Amino acid sequence: MTRTSQPTRLPADVYESALAATLVTSRTVPQQIAHWARIGRELEMSPAVNHRQIASVLAGAGSYDELGEQEQAIVREEWAERMVALRGELNYAARFAAAGESYSEVEDDGKLIVHPARD
């Protein structure tokens, strides 16, 4: 079954907040809004979850160890999503080429490949 997105009107402040969040989360605006919706759904299903503590930890201002099990699970999921997004953006070949550096890598069969620096 293929699902399609339905057009949805959003308050301007929600859109602007999502746009601002894209700068630090590596998500698109629709991805950020969907992420917030999933978090909201989980929070509503579990009244014991403290969203302010979660946001504090995700912002680097709170302690992960002080969270409850449910809050820690939400934080771990967010961290996992962020890592996947950041890894997807990595392009070391382009970075080395731009810096004029050579680099090497090992293929799956163990063969060493050396990529010389380009002038």
Image (cartoon, helix red, strand yellow):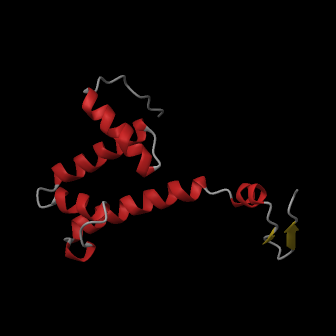
On screen, 57 above or below 40? below
In this view of the protein, which residue sits in the foreground, 110 or 3?
110
In this view of the protein, which residue sits in the foreground, 21 or 10?
21
Locate residue 71 relative to residue 25 in the image: left or right. left
Seen at 40% across and 62% down, the residue is: 79
Locate residue 106 relative to residue 38 in the image: left or right. right
Seen at 45% across and 40% down, the residue is: 28
Q: Tell me where residue 10 appears, x and y as whole percent.
A: 28, 27
In terms of image quadrants, where is residue 101?
A: bottom right
Q: Tell me where residue 29 appears, x and y as whole percent.
A: 41, 37
Residue 56 in sight here: yes
Q: Tell me where residue 85 appears, x and y as whole percent.
A: 51, 54
Seen at 11% across and 61% down, the residue is: 48
On screen, 71 above or below 31? below
In terms of image quadrants, where is residue 50?
A: bottom left
* Count of numbered badges drawn on the protein: 0
Residue 106 in sight here: no
User: Which quadrant, please, contains the C terminus?
Assistant: bottom right
